[in-house]
Image (cartoon, rainbow, N blue to C red):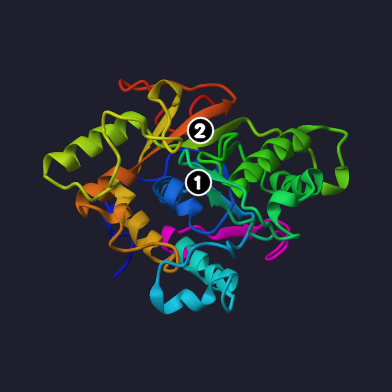
Amino acid sequence: MSLRLDAADASPAQDGAADQRLLLVHAHPDDETINNGATMARYVAEGRSVTVVTCTAGEMGEVLVPDLEHLAYDKEGGLGERRRGEIAEAMAALGVTDHRWLGGFGRFHDSGMAWHPDGHAVAAEVVPDNAFWHADLREAADELVRIIREVRPQVLVTYDEFGNYGHPDHIQAHRVATYATALAAAPTYKRDLGEPHDVAKVYWCAISEARMRDSLREIRATGDTTTYEGMDPDGELGPFFTADELISARIDGQAWATTKMEALKLHRTQVDPDGPFFAGAESGHAFWGDEYYVLAKGPRGPVGEDGFEADLFAGL
């Protein structure tokens, strides 16, 4: 069965959609689907161009499938190669045909992470020598400059300056994307990397704090105290969520929510099919169908009654 049947009644491609190009810069395989899966599936269906750049193969990720634990970095290894296949399958499910590894597969290694007592990620005590976290910023940025100048996107999506929750690779992806965006536009910078191109709009991924609180209240009202255990709808939620007054855009991807969740399941080593991403079945899908963004660069377009842009290309 096609993974895209849920989008069959979606609107046809918009005028000029073929000339609209989105570039997403992510740290590890699965980050792109968690944060932007519905957006990507929707835009592909509308005839827009979607390019995904992944900075590392996620070699040091936690393996959540017992039968595959031997692939872990601290055991036999091989997780990066496994995740290479997983993201290929996920991209196919979303309809994305242009996926690239920053500098080529294996150029930059997963840096790993540790958890801070305050609940956010930090760099681990031991970081591999070839880790993305240790990469020369201009060297890594040049690899992205080359892609930006080739693809010539109007919109680029990445993380905020904290990597949304502190993971060193997410922070580095933000730095690389920010620096590369500036360098790609400079008319005198390394013309051998391509003709200069100015990305018109840059967005940072976000999860709506208000939406999360509402969802938690609905879950708790059913008597469920284990899903998102320890999270209080009226308490401190930590760094994973963004205050709604800072959010600029909400992409309605409800027609592609099931497609997104099926693609997420293809990241088999990283996603627990019984975990919180899939909590409440349809209610869980509905939560992840709406995707939110903070505008970091460029003009804000028209907003709807909810106060958000409904399209990342709005205003261009």
Q: Which label's residue is closer to the chain start, 1 or 2?
A: 1
Q: Are marks 1 and 2 in contact (CB under 8 Å)?
A: yes
In magenta stretch: residue 106: yes
Write down the residue under mark 1.
48
User: Residue 178 shows which numbered tag?
Assistant: none
Query: Where does the image place residue 301, in percent across and percent down from the top left?
Result: 48, 22
Q: Give the vertical position of 171 relative to 135 (above or below).
A: above
Cα gap from disc 1 to disc 2, whole angstroms:
10 Å
Is residue 128 rendered magenta in the image? no
- State the image quarter where residue 278 is shown: bottom left
The secondary structure type at the circle numbered 2 is loop
Label 1 packing within 10 angstroms: few (<14), some (14-19), many (20+): some
Q: Does 7 sit above or below residue 189?
A: below
Residue 313, numbered circle: 2
Judge left or right: residue 146 versus residue 207: right
* 223 and 284: which is toward the camera: 223
SS type, badge 1 = loop
**Residue depicted at x 73% and y 58%:** 103
Q: Is residue 208 shown left or right of residue 32?
A: left
Residue at 37% across / 34% down in the picture?
A: 237
In the rendering, at what x and y percent does residue 128 appear?
Answer: 70, 60
One can see residue 143 in this view: no
Mark 2: amino acid: Phe
Query: 201 or 135, which is in the foreground?
Result: 135
**Label 1 sits on what residue type?**
Arg
Range shown magenta = 92-108
Residue found at x 48% / y 61% = 91
Quadrant showing the C terminus? top right
**Residue 251 visible here:** yes
